[in-house]
Each structure stands twice: as structure tokens, then as C-alpha cells.
Amino acid sequence: MAGAEHEVLVARDAMTVYSFLLDGRNLPSWQAGVRSAGLSSGSAGSVGAVYQVTMDGPRGRPVARDYEITAARPGAEIQFQVVAGPSLVRGGFYLSTEGAGTRVRFALESPSKGFWSFVRPACRGRLRTVVGQLSSLPGVMEERTTAG
């Protein structure tokens, strides 16, 4: 398994951060390369909900990276599984209260069996890039909450 994780501190309460992350339609505001995201099935923000996500792909072509919410604990944890796209990663957001803010850990893992075990270092690098985008979340959340 290839995996990566990254943590940030957001100056907002855990339920506000949880609600923001749970709604997949917010992805374009903090993840680079996300062209669009919308609910395709299920109830928004609930276990079983599937979000249709279109990302920038090779040579500027759109790539599907749809995902399903597989577990959710309000204010504490969101887990998901990518169900469409070139790599079927799984991951989650793990929240904990820290002072007046919320510490968020974003973790991803990708199964790498057989042939794919040869590309594990490249896969790990891509995963690190994706989880590293969590660094933009505090600015987006803090600006949005203040403005809203």
C-alpha cells in the first residue's frame, strides 16, 4: 500500500470544519485541479452519498474521480472510497479539537498489488501532493466563515 497524510490547524470549531469537508461540492474551493463536484446519488453528506468529481487530467483532459462516503462520525471523522477514476484510493479526514480550533488530518492510501507495486514511489508522490493541498483549507475556511 502506498499512503500519505498531512495535518493542518483550522481556526474554526470541529462541526463547522466537519460540515464543510463532508459536502463534496466544496472541493473546488480548496483542492487544485478540481473542475467540478456535485452530488450524484444518496443524501448529501451521509454515508453512501456519491459525489461526481471532475479533475484536470493528462493533457488537460477531464478525469472522473467520483467518491463515496463510507463512514462519518459528526465532528470527528469522514472516510471515503474513490469509485471512479484511474486509481481507486481510499482515505479520510480525522478531526480533533485543539484550543479554539480544529486539527485536521487528511490521509490517503492506494492499493498497489501486482504490476502497480512497481509504480509505488510515483503513486506515493501523487498522494503526498493531494494531501498537501490541505494546507489551503485554513485560509479558505477562515475567510469563508468570516465573510459568511
Image: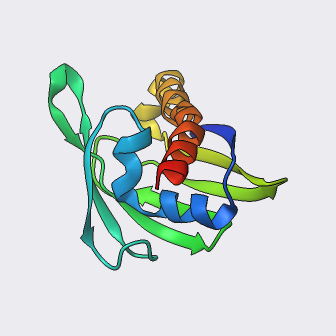
Establish if 22 lies above or below 102.
Answer: below
Residue 118 picture location, percent across and down: 47, 25
Question: Horizontal and vertical percent for residue 23?
Answer: 42, 62
25 relative position to 71: left or right = left
Image quadrant in which the N terminus is located? top right
**Between 53 and 114, which is closer to the camera in this rendering?**
53
Q: Is residue 109 above or below residue 26?
A: above
**How was the colour assigned to the protein in this rendering?**
rainbow
Residue 121 visible, this orientation: yes
Question: What residue is rendered at 53% in x and 34% in y?
Answer: 136
Q: Quadrant of residue 48?
A: bottom left
User: In the displayed structure, does residue 88 sit left or right of residue 73?
Assistant: left
Q: Residue at x 52, y 24 (%)?
A: 125
Horizontal arrangement in the rendering, residue 61 relative to residue 15 (left or right): left
Q: Is residue 49 above or below residue 93?
A: below
Task: Please identify the residue farthest to the front as the structure is shown.
Answer: 147
Looking at the image, how many numbered discs can be counted on the residues? 0
The spot of residue 86 in percent (x, y) is 29, 40
The quadrant in which residue 4 appears is top right
Which is more toward the observer, 59 or 89? 59
Q: In percent of the image, x 59 and y 58: which residue is there?
A: 17
Name the residue at the right extreme.
Answer: 99
Q: Is residue 88 visible?
A: no
The picture places residue 81, in percent across and down from the top left corner, at 44, 58
The residue under the point 48% across, 41% down is 113
